[in-house]
Amino acid sequence: MTRLDTLVRAPVDLAGYRLGAPQRAGALTMAPIFGPERPGIVPPRSGLKLSRVAGYGNVELHNGAASGVAIVPLHIGYIQEGAQNHALCSAALLGAGEKRMFADACCVQAAQGGYLEGRDQWFFVLPRELRAKALQLRGQVGYSKLWPEIAQLNSRYQLPARGHLEQILSRKRAVLTQFRSRLELLPGQLGAVFFAGERFAGLEIAPDPRFFAELWMPLVCFAYGVAAWQAEPPRTEAEPFDADDLAGLRAALDTSRETAAGQLNSWMPADTEVYAVEEERYLDLRLHTLTGVELAGQLVTEHDRPVYASLFAVD
C-alpha cells in the first residue's frame, strides 16, 4: 500500500493512513484509504437527523445519540418532504442530544416547482463543482446565495440554466447511483481519494469504517460522481490481456494494477500546501477550514491527529 502522507502535504499528521489498490468505473477512479480508527463518533445517517427547516436558509439538525459527538459532514444536504431542500456550507460538531439551527444554509431549489423528491428521505453531498463556492459562503445569511452557481453547473451539463439542483440529483439519480455498484466499498475502509478523468477530485477520511459506509453513496454518486458522469469516455471494447495461460493472465493483471497505482502520483495536485483556520471546538476535537491554491475543505482533529477530513480540488 502507498503511504498517504507521501501524496498529500497538509497541516496535519497523515502518518498511518495508506492507500489500497485503485478501482475505476468509467471516468471515476477511487483509491481506498485505510488507517487508524477513532471510535465513538456518531455516524451521519443513523445518528444525525434533520429536525426541521424553519423557513428558507434555516436548517436544524439533531444529534439523537445517547452519547458521542456527531461530526456533521461538510456540504451535506437534506431532503425533506413538503419543504425546500437545503445544503450546509460547513461541517460542525454536535454533542449528544444537541440541536443546532444553521442559519447560513443554502437552498438548492430556486422555486416551489423545483422540489426534490422527498419520499426517500435521503441525504446528499454537494457536487464538487459547487463546494469551493459553498465553503466561501459559510456564515453568510442568504438562502439563494448558491443559485447562480447551481444554474451555471446545470448549463455546463446542457440542462436548463436554473438554480434547481434536482435537475442533477433527482433526474440523473439512476445514472449517478451506478457508481455505487461499480465501485466496491472494502472491509475496514474509512476513506478514499477520488479522481475524475485524470484529475484529482477529492480526499475523504472518516473516523471509522461505519461512518464512511454511511457517507459512501452521497460521496460516490453526488459529490464526485457528477463530474465523472460528464467525463465518461466513449464505450469501447476492452483490450484483452496478452497472456497464454492463467499464470500469464495473473501477471498481466498485476502489471495493470501497478500501472494504475503509479498514475495516482501524477494526478495529485502539484501544490497541495494549505492553510488552516480553527472554526469551532468540542472537548478535544477541533474543526478547521483549509484553503490553498489547488485544495480547500475542512478537517476535524483530536490532539493534532485527523479524525475527519473532506478536501476537494479547487478549479
Image: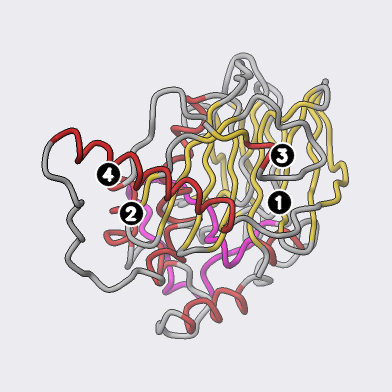
Residue 302 location, quadrant: top right
Comparing labels 3 and 2, the label whose residue is closer to the camera: 2
Q: How many marks?
A: 4
Residue 226 location, quadrant: bottom left
Residue 297 circle label: 1
Q: CA distance from mark 4 to mark 3?
A: 46 Å
At a point 69% along the width and 67% down the height, the residue shown is 133
Identify residue type, mark 2: Ala
Task: List the residue tagged with mark 4.
Answer: 252
Q: CA distance from mark 4 to mark 1?
A: 38 Å
Few, some or many residues within 10 Å of mark 4 (<14, 14–19, 20+): some
> Is 3 contained in the magenta span?
no
| Residue 206 drawn at (x, y percent) | 58, 32
| Residue 230 drawn at (x, y percent) | 40, 72
Q: First in sequence, mark 3 or 2: give its number.
A: 2
- Which region shows up in magenta? 105-131
Few, some or many residues within 10 Å of mark 1 (<14, 14–19, 20+): many
Identify residue type, mark 1: Gly
Is residue 276 or residue 33 the one in the foreground?
Answer: 33
Identify residue type, mark 4: Ala
Identify residue type, mark 3: Ala
Comparing labels 3 and 1, the label whose residue is closer to the camera: 1
At a point 58% along the width and 57% down the height, the residue shown is 266
Task: List the residue tagged with mark 3.
Answer: 92
Mark 2 residue element: strand
Mark 3 residue element: strand
